[in-house]
Amino acid sequence: MQRLAIIGGTGLLNMATGQPFADAGLEVLATDSFEVETPYGNVPLKSFQLQHGSAEKTLVFLQRHHNEGKPNKPPHNINHHANIWALKNANVDAVLSVCSVGCLVQDFPPGRVGLADQYIDFTGQTTTFHDDEAEFTSVTVPFDRAMNASLESVLRQGQGLTDERLYFTYWLAQGPQFETAAEVRAIEKLGAHVVGMTMPREAKLCREIALPYAALLIGSNWAAGKEPGDENADLSHEAVSAEANRRLGPVWNCITSLLTQ
């Protein structure tokens, strides 16, 4: 892949020094930070020009919660239209989203990294580029199968997994509050395996513009009521973020594997 976009948090960007690239045989030629003007607002991006053998590659990084230097924008206010439009106009070949999620099922515990293959969005919030004229986009298969197959191999090898399940259904919660224990029980009964507050809106917009998209799921915490031995345990935003940032090794393996194909 020549030009790859990553959507993630600041912890991922902070790891983007020369070492993760060097470990994968990628040389950093140059970096650049710039803003892209879109009809929906400006979007800051950071790009890395890389060399792999005789091939030049580009990695474009988008901080999902960017907020003009202020504290991170809350999930319900993220400008997904501007973000995806900016990546489209950066001429990337594909988008890899990195998502911190709450875990609902025993075979996806905190600390594991998996892949999304379906999502459930009952928030009632419309996310589309087609507000003026009806256009209906199929999302039967919402994530890019070729990307997922490639990433599955990397995740299995990097985490020492064989036949364990790696594909999961993501439930989109409105937020910004975490879910109640009762909501989590209902969510699980409706077929979800993990819960988060952002990713499907990105997936929908990428699907509308035929931009290949895959989502890495970092299990950062047990969802409300699921903590073994303490079903009343409170959730902490700081603890959830810190746990996600400790699990970025497999994520970087996935990123560099796509760039070195």
Image (spheres, rainbow, N blue to C red):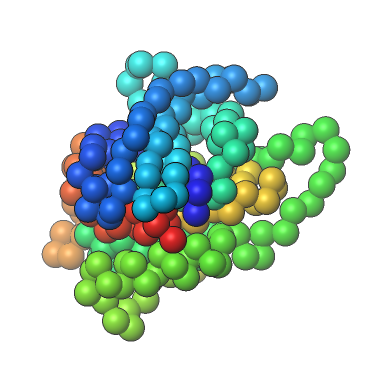
* Drawn side of residue 14 relative to residue 166, left or right: left
Q: Quadrant of residue 232?
A: bottom left
Q: Is residue 156 above or below residue 201?
A: below
Q: Which sits in the foreground, 71 or 231?
A: 71
* Drawn side of residue 2 relative to residue 235, left or right: right
Q: Residue furthest bottom?
A: 163
Q: Residue furthest left?
A: 229
The quadrant of the picture occupied by the C terminus is bottom left
Q: Residue furthest top?
A: 69
Query: Would you say residue 189 is visible in this rendering?
Result: no
Q: Residue at x 45, y 55 (%)?
A: 215
Q: Residue at x 50, y 54 (%)?
A: 1
Q: Is residue 137 above or below residue 33?
A: below
Q: Residue at x 84, y 43 (%)?
A: 134
Query: Would you say residue 142 is visible in this rendering?
Result: yes
Q: Position of residue 126 (x, y in %)?
A: 66, 40
* Drawn side of residue 66 relative to residue 157, left or right: right
* Drawn side of residue 230 relative to residue 3, left or right: left
